[in-house]
Image: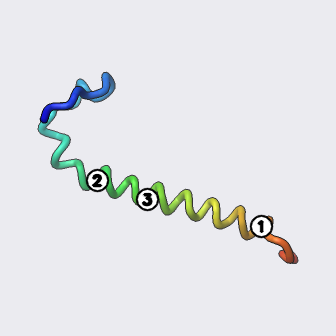
Amino acid sequence: MDHPRPKVFRQIPKEMFEPTKALAANQGLYNGFLAAGLIWSIWIEIRPGNST
């Protein structure tokens, strides 16, 4: 099934999508852990009973 691509991706050859799929998934996982770490660090700072 051929889906229309967003305008920004039209200059990237179709052949590049499949080989870079794992890289995109890895980037998404990295961003998820980065966000979790940021939320965790904020939660540690504002939780009740924190003496720092």
Instruction: State the residue position of label 2.
Output: 23
Q: How far apart in space, not on screen, are marks 3 and 2 (Cα)? A: 10 Å
Q: Residue 15, relative to residue 45: is it above or below?
A: above
Percent position of residue 22, x then y: 25, 55
Residue 41: x and y, percent? 68, 65
Q: Which residue is mark 1?
A: 45
Disc nearer the start of the sequence (1/2):
2
Q: Helix or strand or loop: what does disc 1 sit on?
A: helix
Query: In what element is the residue under mark 2?
Result: helix
Q: Is residue 7 above or below residue 41?
A: above
Marks 1 and 3, Cα distance to the nearest angstrom?
23 Å
Tell me which residue sits at (49%, 63%) in the image: 33
User: Does residue 36 appear left or right of residue 46 in this picture?
Assistant: left
What is the CA distance from the residue labelled 1 to the residue labelled 2? Answer: 33 Å
Q: Secondary structure at mark 3?
A: helix
**Image position of 44 with respect to 11: above or below:** below
Q: Residues within 10 Å of mark 2 (few under 14, many from 20)?
A: few
Looking at the image, which residue is at 71% across and 65% down?
A: 43
